[in-house]
Image (tube, rainbow, N blue to C red):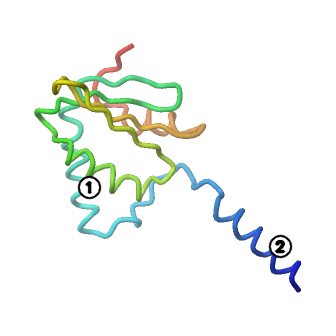
Amino acid sequence: MFLNNVLTAVLMAAAASAPSPIACNLKALPPAVRAHHAALSEKLRAPAISRQELPDGIAFKLNPAMMKLVEVADWVDAERRCCPFLDFHITLEREGAGLQLALTGRQGVKEFLRSDFAKVAPVTK
């Protein structure tokens, strides 16, 4: 009986740690939050000055005068719930020079991001 319980616990832990699919789950957000997130997603496109491809994702340089840090953090907070397969990195450059948002993850994430953010800002090298 003990061995059976241990085996069940190990199998449940392994299933719980399996990576989530690389697909957005919009049902993870209540309707009001989803609407607010959609508005922030639209707003996020305008201040994107440039887009840089990273080995495991994409980084966007944002104009901090057009989108505040708190709005970027609010967008990330909702996005992480519907896209748990993403890693998020917010970088603030010294003296207010810029704001960067990087989205990264495991194999396959970069291709997903390319299709989802294809028309956001020009690519820089």
Q: Is residue 42 left or right of residue 125?
A: left
Amino acid under disc 1: His
State which tag comes first along the sequence, 1 or 2: 2
Count the numbered circles shown: 2
Q: CA distance from mark 1 to mark 2?
A: 41 Å
Asked if the residue at tag 2 contacts the one at tag 1, i.e. Cβ–Cβ closer than 8 Å, the answer is no
Compare residues 22 and 7 and report the one nearer the observer: 7
Compare residues 6 and 115 and report the one nearer the observer: 6
Amino acid under disc 2: Leu
| Quarter of the image that includes the C terminus | top left
Return the mark for residue 7: 2
Location of residue 41 with respect to 102 vertically, above or below: below
The quarter of the displayed image where residue 18 is located? bottom right
Q: Position of residue 56 (x, y in %)?
A: 52, 31
Q: Position of residue 110 (x, y in %)?
A: 50, 34
* x 21%, y 26%: residue: 98
Compare residues 121 and 101 and report the one nearer the observer: 101
Q: Residues within 10 Å of mark 1 (few under 14, many from 20)?
A: many
* x 45%, y 60%: residue: 25
Q: Position of residue 21 (x, y in %)?
A: 57, 53
* x 41%, y 65%: residue: 28
Location of residue 47 with respect to 80 vertically, above or below: above
Q: Is residue 2 left or right of residue 41?
A: right
Q: Which residue is mark 1?
A: 37
Of all residues shown, which one is farthest toward the left? Answer: 65
The quarter of the displayed image where residue 65 is located? top left
